[in-house]
Image (spheres, rainbow, N blue to C red):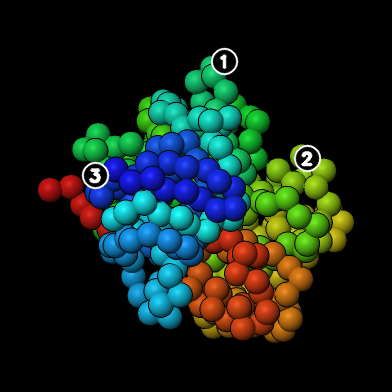
Amino acid sequence: MSHQITLQPSGHQFKADDQTSLLQAALDAELLVPYGCRDGACGSCKARVIEGEFEHGRSPLSTLTEADREKGMALLCCAQARSDMQIECRDVRRSGDIPLRKLPCRVTALHLAAGDVMVVNLKLPANDVFRYLAGQYIDFLLADGRRRSFSIANAPGGESIELHIRKVDGGFFTEHVFAKMKERDILRFEGPLGGFFLRESSKPVVFLAGGTGFAPIKAIVEDMRARGIKRPVTLYWGSRDSHGLYMAGLAHQWSKEIADFRYVPVISGEPPADWPGRTGLVHQAVMDDLPDMSGVEVYACGAPAMIEAARGDFARCGLPEDAFFADAFTFATDALP
């Protein structure tokens, strides 16, 4: 059964059946609403239901709490309509100007940036422009029908894309990347995907990265430079050890070359004797520096636990809900049968 879904305050409308998530139905209608992981981990697609009946589906309590549910909140990537609905959803755009595409690509370079991080460069088809917003991601389309998602780590406009792929123990695709992938290999992908991109604003920007969550933030910083966007920026990049900050040299370079740009490295494990940065949880370093976060925007990318902790703790520091944008990385550890 099909239901009419209206998004407020934009007034955009789309149809959703009982079996399809509200997010997927919106995307099928070429409406780009905020989203990230598509499996309930990041909370980017959380929205308030003004009117109508729905099922929460597989929405995890860690992301959509009982208090959220009592307030009528829903995760659009998990929820399914049971009637016509009105949903309050900020920052809705038409996606037709940046179409979702399936394309082949060729591996042109593989660089081991850390023991468990491979930088992969992919050449796009000649004379074919792949458009995306800095911060979005692609899905590799594997031969068995499975997908693997990776954020694009370079700004739009070039003839290639860069990915930062972390090795996952037992991960079929990432183990292939580290053990078998070679230059000139051909892959297929679909994209662009995701709602993680810089919003138009004059507020200072706080980037919060965990591990390879640095990848989409790198793309956004490069895009800001290319477009001449001048906003105060602080990048907090956290890892268990200093090796996980695999492009720290680039981040330090930005702090020297970009006006009003600050880089704060944070490691949560035992620091080396000469460690010049901060220690502990990376999101705690943000709160130590910014006990009042009411005047900033936060763009966070990393593991779901980091995103969940930052969302809740930053709200207690005064960060408005509509000033927190996130992309949570989840890692697949399945193997081929």
For residue 11, above or below residue 82: above
Q: Residue at 37% x, 31% y: name it.
A: 187
**Which amino acid, mark 3?**
Met
Mark in front: 2 vs 3:
3
Seen in the image, is 14 located left or right of residue 261?
left
Picture coordinates of residue 48, whole percent (x, y): 48, 64
Pick whichever of labels 2 and 3 is earlier in the sequence. 3
**Which amino acid, mark 2?**
Arg
On the image, which quarter does residue 78 sit in? Answer: bottom left
| Furthest-top residue in this view | 127
Pick whichever of labels 2 and 1 is earlier in the sequence. 1
**Which amino acid, mark 1?**
Asn
Separation of marks 3 and 1 at Cα, in angstroms: 43 Å
Q: Secondary structure at mark 2?
A: helix
Separation of marks 2 and 1 at Cα, in angstroms: 23 Å
For residue 15, above or below residue 318: above
Picture coordinates of residue 38, whole percent (x, y): 39, 54
Label 2 sits on residue: 227
Separation of marks 2 and 3 at Cα, in angstroms: 45 Å
Q: Residue 1 got which mark?
A: 3
Mark in front: 3 vs 1:
3
On the image, which quarter does residue 249 sit in? Answer: bottom right
Crowding near the residue tagged with mark 3, few <14, some 14–19, many ≥20 C-alpha atoms within 10 Å = few
For residue 307, above or below residue 6: below
Pick whichever of labels 3 and 1 is earlier in the sequence. 3
Label 1 sits on residue: 127
Crowding near the residue tagged with mark 1, few <14, some 14–19, many ≥20 C-alpha atoms within 10 Å = few
